Image (tube, rainbow, N blue to C red):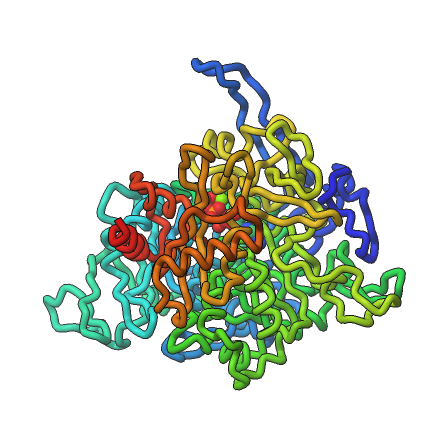
Amino acid sequence: MTAFAYTDPHAPTPNPALISDEARIEFWAEQAGRLDWAEPWHTTHRFEKPRRTGEDEDGNPTYTVPEIAWFEGGKLNVSYNCVDRHVAAGRGNHVALYFEGEPGDRAVYTYADLQREVSRAANALLDLGVGQGDRVVIYLPVIPETVIITLACARIGAVHSLVFGGFSAEALKFRVEDTGAKVLVTTDGQNRRGVVVPVKAAADEACSGENAIEHVVVVRRTSRPGRTDLPRGTRGLRSKDQELVPWTPVRDVWWHELTARASDVHEPLAFDAETPLFIIYTSGTTGKPKGLVHTMGGYLVQTAYTHALMFDLLPDVPDADGVLRPDELSAVNDSAKVDSTVHWCTADLAWVTAHTYEIYGPLVNGVSEVIYEGTPNTPDYGRHFEVIERYGVTNYYTAPTLIRALMGAFPRGLPPVYNLSSIRLLGSVGESINPEAWRWLRAQVGRDEVPFVDTWWQSETGSCVASPRPHDPQFAPPGTFDDAAPRTSPKPGCVTRAVPGVSLRVVDEDGTEVAPGLQGFAVVDKIGPSMARTVWKDPQRFLSSYWAAYGERGWFLAGDGARADEEGDLYILGRVDDVINVSGHRLSTIEIESALVTHPHVVEAGATPVTDAVTGHAVLAYVVLTRAALDLSPEEVRDELRAHVAREIGPIAKPREVIAVPDLPKTRSGKITRRLLGQLYEGAPLGDRSSLQNEEALDAIAAVLAARR
Ligand code: ATP
Ligand code: MG
């Protein structure tokens, strides 16, 4: 038995047996009962671990690629499960989506509306010649059409691949070509920070090389309706700001014209559970993105279960002390909880977080959710709080980078003008959350009392692997228990335990478990049904990236460092690639950054190793300062913050340099790309940059560094 498996002593029905293979597989078979299946499966799970086959020319061991399958023989329709069955169950009038556009436009879709729109979209795609197995790249902002077209692809068995609307033509081109997509869906333009940004030209550029694109479908978002009747000979359509929407006749199709002639009734077909559902490219934080393939049945089962677990939809049962706790093994949700939930995951729809906890999870569980198109600071940083108040959001699930930005915007706390009393739960994903940011959000938005789920997972695992439980005793108010105090105190930045049905270990290079308090590699030693099946068109990369180290044992290497505390609760310490090794002391980037952001001058921090002739590595830190600190000299900043880190962690962690910069480079999902920070400082060639959301941050840092030399 491993320390991090499902052994939660506080759970209402402790079932350590869940980590035996049979019990675990049986658990997932029960959870599969959450879905409507057109045909039952014959084999719940099959896992062919990598087997050693010999050696390559250089004497390195070679292995077979792993094969993973769940619910083989079963048939289902993912879109039916997310939409139609709620209508069939009499919940057609329940709100599925509350949409708010950045300019302030709003729309509400009930489940019945969604059923009509998804059906219409499915018919429209079929009309274009899209069929089962064809790839569709969806390059759209956060608008209802994105959700509708994604579900329509799932409905007809086409494989979708969503691309962040803020990506460059180059990043899109790579995905269009790598997926071999037949159709690209895009918009005329996007609302971004209060202005209309043209998009279609970038889509055209992405389609300019060798590819399989037959149609570019354009959703009208920013151009004026009714301007499809331009004078003859005009090649293109004028948008609101009179920019020409470039147009290639025959290839390009307006979405509203395509759907106008499509029926809103579509009979979904059932597909084999192992049919590919989507290809998701990793954030590219550490290098060239990998196109991970997820399949229909297993993905939807674990997504449905983990969404219910983390966002508190499971029925409550009394534990030994008579305290009500969610029944973590239940395969059905509490209908009152489902009805009263207004979920908001703030991620862009193209990120894996949004696939699982903004598209599929909330909809398969039948809750209402908010989707918001814009940036959080348009027109100002109060926007998210207005949205929470307007729709009565109960679950606010966001990323550390945004929380830090909000802290920077409201250094004295939120003004008392927002009514945030609807909030029942907070959540975070994407990076280790700095304890300071955790406390800030819980105090400012969560009244210092709501549960906070810090959810650790990856594009590869498809859904959450480790997270605190909403009813974890660490969140219980004083006086809940006989001893008049919570049994454990809050643990900010702690991802706690594996979710039921999967298990984790923290191991060293040889696979030996490391003792509490020490840093090791996080491995998923028992995978769940939503695990990626392969890397698109590159199974060898799937093998070499994740299974080379411990694959023969069937363990998946997650690539993150981790540490357990004495109670067996887990902390993620950042990428293994980012570990800083100063004279043999392994320091975690995230701990240094978290120490820096506790300083009142610091909004954000990025720490990275740089080579040091004596100590191996030295710590280099970049910081984004609050406005009040901008008058300080570079020397004052450095000395003050070096001393601060020495006080918070110890002299060994003291950065060699602390450099104030205007912004840190981040991926589209808001992760700091630390490898670029080191490369900039050392003047090394910069690696893959295609996933950055703010390439200009690199130039700004280069300018700061040049000014120092
Ligand atoms: P690439 O694999 O291409 O470098 P990426 O790892 O950033 O990109 P994602 O799959 O979007 O792509 O991100 C998963 C990673 O995000 C995890 O491996 C982990 O490093 C980090 N992460 C996600 N959630 C958490 C969390 N709650 N705590 C700590 N780290 C997290
Ligand atoms: Mg990764």
Q: Position of residue 503 (x, y in %)?
A: 69, 42
Residue 593 seen: yes
Percent coordinates x, y for residue 422 in the rendering = 62, 78
Q: Nearer the viewer, residue 503 or 271?
A: 503
Give whichever of 109, 663 is nearer the camera: 663
Please identify the quarter of the rendering in which residue 81 is found.
Answer: bottom right
Query: Where is 197 relative to 666, above or below?
Result: below
Residue 525 falls left or right of residue 100: right
Which residue corresponds to the image point at 32% horizontal and 56% vertical from the top-left? 697
Q: Is residue 35 left or right of residue 176?
A: right
Q: Most extreme residue toward the bottom, as rendered? A: 417
Left or right, residue 34 beside residue 614: right
- Residue at point 87%, 66% (across, down): 483
Q: Position of residue 520 (x, y in %)?
A: 61, 38
For the point 74% across and 42% down, which residue is it? Answer: 3
Q: The N terminus is located in which quarter?
A: top right
Residue 110: quarter of image: bottom right
Along the line of sight, the residue nearer the viewer: 458 or 496: 496
Give the percent coordinates (x, y) of residue 575: 51, 43
Q: Is residue 400 left or right of residue 314?
A: left
The extreme left residue here reads: 233
Q: Nearer the viewer, residue 665 or 17?
A: 665
